[in-house]
Amino acid sequence: MTDQTTTFDAAPASAPITEDMAARNKLVIGLLLISAFVVILNETIMGVALPHLMKDLNIPASSAQWLTTAFMLTMAVVIPITGFLLQKLNTRPVFILAMSLFSAGTLISALSPGFAMLVIGRIVQASGTAIMMPLLMTTVMHLVPPESRGKTMGNISIVISVAPAIGPTISGLILSVLDWRWMFILVLPIALGALALGASRIRNVTTPKDAPIDVLSILLSIIGFGGFVYGVSGIGNVNPEPGTLPAWIPLVIGAATIVIFVFRQLGLQKQDRALLDLRTLTSTTFTLAVVMMSILMMSMFGAFILIPIYLQNVLHFDVLHTGLLLLPGGLIMGLCAPTVGKYYDKYGPRPLVIPGSVILAVALWTLTLVTPDTSFWLVLVVHLLMSVGLALMFTPLFTVSLGALPPNLYSHGSAMIGTTQQVAGAAGTALFVALFTLQSTQLGLGGADLVAATSGGLHIAFITGAVISLAAVVISLFITKPPESGMPGDMGHGH
């Protein structure tokens, strides 16, 4: 394939990085990190707000969770397309597209009169978020040499772990004094500021190539990933509206369409035309890391959406105290990430990933013991343990997964990680909420009071998360550091 010229061509692999280039690279990565922080914060800002919104908008839990699920579902649908976007377009236009979509979605959410418009706003927001993460990771893989990637990925992990972790605290603080719309009104100027700064300062750091788009692949990915997650989230709807499809129908259609999507990609990648190049999965290291990250996302999002429900509906915390109780976990994740990155560069992934998976499993098994009489101190300690476990795993897994790929597959690798994470996160949220709803409804019908029924529903969901976490412990034993290949400068040329 022929490369198109660009404002800023990459230096050849053998060329030394000049001071000007190093300064440019640092600026680009810094701006992308700040913007990514703002957009990812919104993925979990709704967590603490859900009980509040259920009352305010008069909607059940199964509807309210769509404010989080629709966000993740949109990301799962849009992210596969980013592999194509990052090959076809330069860094700056992709950044402007991502932040413009995110800002527009934030404005729609801030102005929304009710639930339907709020979901639409969240979907537009998510479209921007979906483009930002693969853009950040692909850019870092191109600009940072292998020996210092752990440190830079540590900084990315701060963004990926701390932003969602402090989302509930920020929304708790806002909701304790202001209307829910302020969660979006306060973010809007920050998003617009990031857009303006990035539009004026970001330089193009990759070389686009002529990447054709396959419309059928886009349609298959929307039906496949969308149908699958929609089906999973419908499982918890114990009183479906008349005329609603049974949950298993979209689930089966989605799963079958994903299979067709995979075969389509396998055919297209022979001609270098795949929307999502599955040659990334021929690397065992990449595949194991992606599977493990999917398990972490299921556990993390499932637990992070249920812990606020437990604190508010069982222990009777208000939104402010719920947010504050979850804050130390977010801060610990942020404090751990740079150190974890340095340790990865020095010792490789296993001394970090194995203890991390064990700590996460212990935390989730401890959550299965909570009752209406449990002290909030136990919840705080468990949340801290979960945060430490996740911090020990995210940086090594991101670095190992992309480091195992040749540079021409970085954009597809980033898109693959993002897609599987979002599908896993959405499926985890939907699965945990479904189990919680089914069990608590059953207990309620059996004569249990609201607190006991809620507690019983949470118990089943936490047991499921704890069982899933054991798979991460097993996989962690097989994670190894890839050989150092793919120096910066190999800027995604055709092969």
Image (spheres, grey):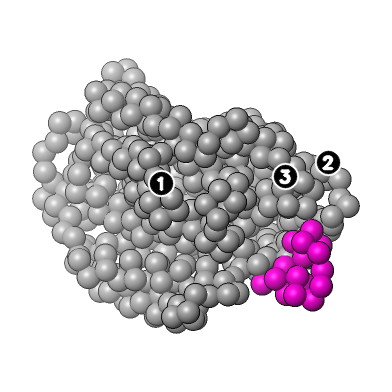
The amino acid on which the numbered mark 2 sits, given as a three-letter code, is: Trp
The amino acid on which the numbered mark 3 sits, given as a three-letter code, is: His
The amino acid on which the numbered mark 1 sits, given as a three-letter code, is: Pro
Cα separation, mark 1 vs mark 2, equals 38 Å
**Residue 56's mark?**
none
Front-most of residues 153 and 329: 329
**Residue 377's mark?**
2
Residue at the outermost top position: 19
- Crowd around label 3: few <14 · some 14–19 · many ≥20 (10 Å): many
Disc number lying in front (1 or 2): 1
* Rendered residue at 36%/60% (across/down): 77
Cα separation, mark 2 vs mark 3, equals 10 Å
**Residue at the disc numbered 3:** 383
Quadrant, the C terminus: bottom left
Q: Main secondary structure of the magenta part?
A: helix
Q: Secondary structure at mark 3?
A: helix
Residue 91 image offset from top left, x and y in percent: 25, 37
Disc number lying in front (2 or 3): 2
Residue at the outermost right position: 373
Residue 441 image offset from top left, x and y in percent: 70, 71
**Residue at the disc numbered 1:** 113
Tell me if residue 391 can be seen.
yes
Horizontal side of residue 456 vs 394, given as left or right:
right
Which callout, 2 or 3, points at the residue further toward the start of the chain?
2
- Crowd around label 2: few <14 · some 14–19 · many ≥20 (10 Å): few
Residue numbers of the magenta segment: 438-455
